[in-house]
Amino acid sequence: GPHGAAAQPLALGPDEVARALTGTPVFTVCNSSNEFVLVSDPATGLRSLGLLCFRSEDADALLSHVRTRQPVLGKGAKVVPITLDQVYMLKAEGIAFRFLPDPLQIKNALQV
């Protein structure tokens, strides 16, 4: 009948998602070993939360917060651009990411 024509929701496979995200840059903060600076996930208490910013200014603000709150970690830290497809691959490795649209949220995230 006419009801059978409903569009199926698109189930994207991991490859398609990664392809769709390719080349979209976001910014994160890495330490001197080029590892992500991770913050504690409030849900688990584990340091497994990577922070991503859409704008480099937000990432700069994040970096200065990291330097203030965690001087040892922040010493060699820097803002690094990363593409969303790379983020997607890291997510598959068990790192959760949170997008930070504003410095206030950055401040809150780092008070954990």
Image (tube, rainbow, N blue to C red):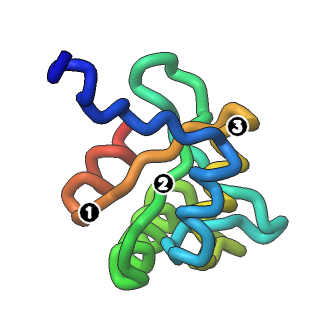
The image quadrant of residue 99 is: bottom left
Query: Could you tell me residue 80's position as x and y percent?
Result: 62, 77
Judge the density around disc 2: few (<14), some (14-19), many (≥20) Cα neighbours within 10 Å: many
Q: Earlier in the sequence, mark 2 or mark 3?
A: 2
Q: Residue at x 54, y 41 (%)?
A: 12
Q: What is the total number of numbered labels drawn onto the structure image? A: 3
User: Can I make out residue 73 in this image?
Assistant: no
Identify the mark at residue 72; answer none if there is no mark: none
Give amino acid for label 1. Answer: Pro
Q: Nearer the viewer, residue 53 or 34?
A: 53
Q: Position of residue 34 (x, y in %)?
A: 78, 67
x, y (%) of residue 45?
A: 51, 21
Does the residue at mark 2 contact the one at mark 3 (Cβ under 8 Å)?
no
Between label 2 and label 3, give the one nearer the viewer.
3
Above or below, 55 against 110 in this view is below
Determine which residue is flagged by label 3. 92
Mark before the other along the chain sequence, 1 or 2: 2
